[in-house]
């Protein structure tokens, strides 16, 4: 990623419920570090990682798409016979949660990875269904003559 002075950036925090941090790039060094004036008034120098994105084009530069990001947190609880996964994401509308369970049938070999994958997949599917339902509700609450995004 090429970040230049004048760009606006956003750094997502990998902690559920902590909002992303935004700021204006003041300087970019030859070693890849950037100096940023954050919207909260602080200034710092740091090395951008995969959780950093450019929000707006540099002045006079080419158009760049605005990219939004969110993090889905998944917690797994398992014992010898059952694995539960809980997926949670925060959107501008609030928290959404999905839950998935995988159980070991009597006589089956115990392969924890399979239970984890099933439980996580089911939790994410439940989360996806909630997000799609929320979007459908939002669309129906705001009818328009203009087209909506469709899947």
Image: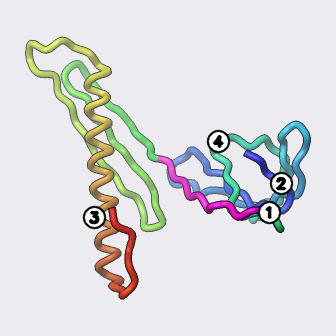
- Distance between mark 1 and mark 4 Cα atoms: 22 Å
Check the image and name the residue furthest to the left. Answer: 106
- Label 3 vs 2, first from the N-terminus: 2
Labelled disc at residue 26: none
- Label 1 vs 4, first from the N-terminus: 4
142 magenta-colored: no
Label 3 environment density (alpha carbons within 10 Å; few <14, some 14–19, many ≥20) = few
Labelled disc at residue 61: 1
Rendered image quadrant of residue 30: top right
- Label 1 vs 3, first from the N-terminus: 1
**Magenta segment main secondary structure:** loop
Question: Is residue 144 rendered to the left or right of residue 106?
Answer: right
User: In which quadrant of the rendered image does the C terminus lie?
Assistant: bottom left
Residue labelled with disc 4: 50
Residue 42 appears in view = no
Vertical placement of residue 125 versus 75, above or below = below
Foreground label between 2 and 1:
1
| Magenta residues, start to end | 62-71
- Distance between mark 3 and mark 2 Cα atoms: 40 Å
Vertical placement of residue 110 versus 98, above or below = above
At a point 29% along the width and 79% down the height, the residue shown is 140
Residue 2 appears in view = yes
Residue labelled with disc 3: 133
Label 4 environment density (alpha carbons within 10 Å; few <14, some 14–19, many ≥20) = few
- Distance between mark 2 and mark 1 Cα atoms: 10 Å
Rendered image quadrant of residue 14: top right
Label 2 environment density (alpha carbons within 10 Å; few <14, some 14–19, many ≥20) = some
Label 1 environment density (alpha carbons within 10 Å; few <14, some 14–19, many ≥20) = few
Is 108 in front, or is 143?
A: 143
Q: Position of residue 146 (x, y in %)?
A: 40, 83
* CB contact under 8 Å: marks 2 and 1: yes
């Amino acid at each position: 990623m090429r970040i230049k002075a004048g760009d606006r950036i956003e750094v997502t925090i990998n902690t559920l419920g902590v909002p992303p941090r935004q700021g204006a790039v003041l300087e970019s060094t030859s070693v890849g570090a950037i100096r940023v004036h954050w919207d909260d008034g602080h200034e710092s120098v740091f090395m951008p990682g995969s959780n950093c994105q450019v929000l707006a084009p540099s002045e006079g530069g080419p158009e760049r798409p605005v990219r939004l990001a969110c993090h889905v947190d998944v917690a797994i609880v398992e014992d010898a016979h059952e694995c539960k996964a809980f997926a949670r994401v925060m959107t501008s509308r609030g928290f959404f949660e999905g839950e998935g369970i995988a159980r070991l049938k009597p006589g089956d070999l115990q392969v924890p990875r399979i239970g984890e994958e099933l439980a996580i997949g089911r939790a994410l599917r439940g989360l996806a269904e909630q997000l799609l339902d929320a979007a459908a509700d939002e669309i129906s609450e705001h009818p328009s003559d203009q087209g909506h995004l469709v899947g």
